[in-house]
Amino acid sequence: MARIHNLDLGDFPLLLAPMEDVSDPPFRFLCKEHGCDMLYTEFISVEGLIRDAEKSIQKLDIYDSERPIGIQIFGAELDSMLQATDIVVEAKPELLDINYGCPVKKVVCKEAGAGILKDIPKMIRLTEAVVKRSSIPVTVKTRLGWDEDSKHIVEVAERLQDIGIAAISIHARTRSQMYKGEADWTLVGEVKNNPRMNIPVFGNGDIDSPEKAKLYKDRYGIDGIMIGRASIGYPWIFREIKHYLKTGNLLPEPTIAKRVDAARQHLVHSIDWKGEKVGVVEMRRHYTNYFRSLEGIKHFRSILVSEANPDVLFDVLEQIRNHYSPELIESF
């Protein structure tokens, strides 16, 4: 049973990884609908929050239907982290998550995200201060280390637990790896199986199938899995993993009709939340994933990623449904 403070997430929860420009409310809605147990916002700059930057403030939007949900922040300055903590607590998520894993240069160069992995004492100081300031549970998402020579995650996880975090999620790569190469879960397993650890340990990285989820669950004994890239354009991954863990059987892949319905629903929510212009533009990154590997999709996709008129986009989605009509046949 995975429990973050008083939050019961069940026997083996599946978490949505915070992803910049991806895990917004429209996307989270679909993941929740398809079985995700714990959602997270996109990561939010503490500097943006305390300066009332519109994009940062908008990321605080959470809805009752999404709960339980965590708001994730990143930063490197103590005073800014504390002010941002107050703002996050006021938004009333179930927990506050600190990002110590983002490998992007513009974040790292400010010693935030994975940049702080080069200064573990500072990571501990910042985290302890946030834990003391926050009235809601504080969790951490991080990586194995900065590079191959600094994979100290077993010790770091202990120290973070000792200063009060309620759970830890570990991306099984170093910052130097970015998102390349195969994720190495060996140290994630060592963190979980460290007899001193008593908080939930969630693994992240390369989980893209029900079979792999079960393999890693059994091999490393983790408390749950955080899924990121595999869910983009494929929110069904959560339901498929749950079904496989429960029954040992694989669910059939979603039909074209279901893919079209999901893309349509995503577009509707995107426009409702962001307005027509931004909602249409920011939806474009998702179409390739919804319809990947479909023979002959290039023509339709080129319209979806260039057209600005929502009515035309909805019409194109229906054209896709009709074009692949043989795949609409489902058994009842």
Image: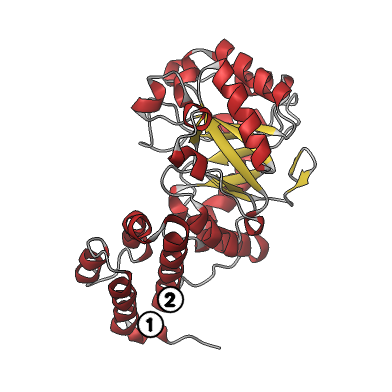
Q: Quadrant of residue 322?
A: bottom left
Q: CA distance from mark 2 to mark 1?
A: 6 Å
Image-based side of 194 in relation to 244, left or right: right
Asked whether disc 2 touches disc 1, contact meaning CB atoms under 8 Å apart, the reply is: yes
- Closer to the camera, 327 or 286? 286
Q: Residues within 10 Å of mark 2 (few under 14, many from 20)?
A: some
Residue at position x 48%, y 47% in the image: 228
**Residue receiving disc 1:** 327
Identify which amino acid the numbered label 1 is placed on: Glu
User: How many marks overall?
Assistant: 2
Q: Which mark is residue 34?
A: none
Residue at position x 46%, y 72% in the image: 254
Q: Quadrant of residue 72?
A: top right
- From the top left corner, tell me how far across and down residue 57 is, in percent: 51, 40
- From the top left corner, tell me how far across and down residue 43 is, in percent: 50, 37
Q: Is residue 237 visible?
A: yes
Q: Is residue 221 visible?
A: no
- From the top left corner, tell me how far across and down residue 130 is, in percent: 66, 23
**Residue receiving disc 2:** 255
Residue at position x 71%, y 32% in the image: 166
Q: Secondary structure at mark 1?
A: helix
Q: Is residue 319 above or below residue 253?
A: below
Residue at position x 40%, y 29% in the image: 103
List the single residue furthest toward the right.
6
Q: Is residue 126 above or below residue 172?
A: above
Image-based side of 228 in relation to 78, left or right: left
Identify which amino acid the numbered label 2 is placed on: Thr
Q: Residues within 10 Å of mark 1 (few under 14, many from 20)?
A: few
Q: Quadrant of residue 192?
A: top right
Q: Is residue 27 above or below residue 139?
A: below
Please identify the quadrant where the C terminus is shown.
bottom right
- From the top left corner, tell me how far across and down residue 187 is, in percent: 56, 29
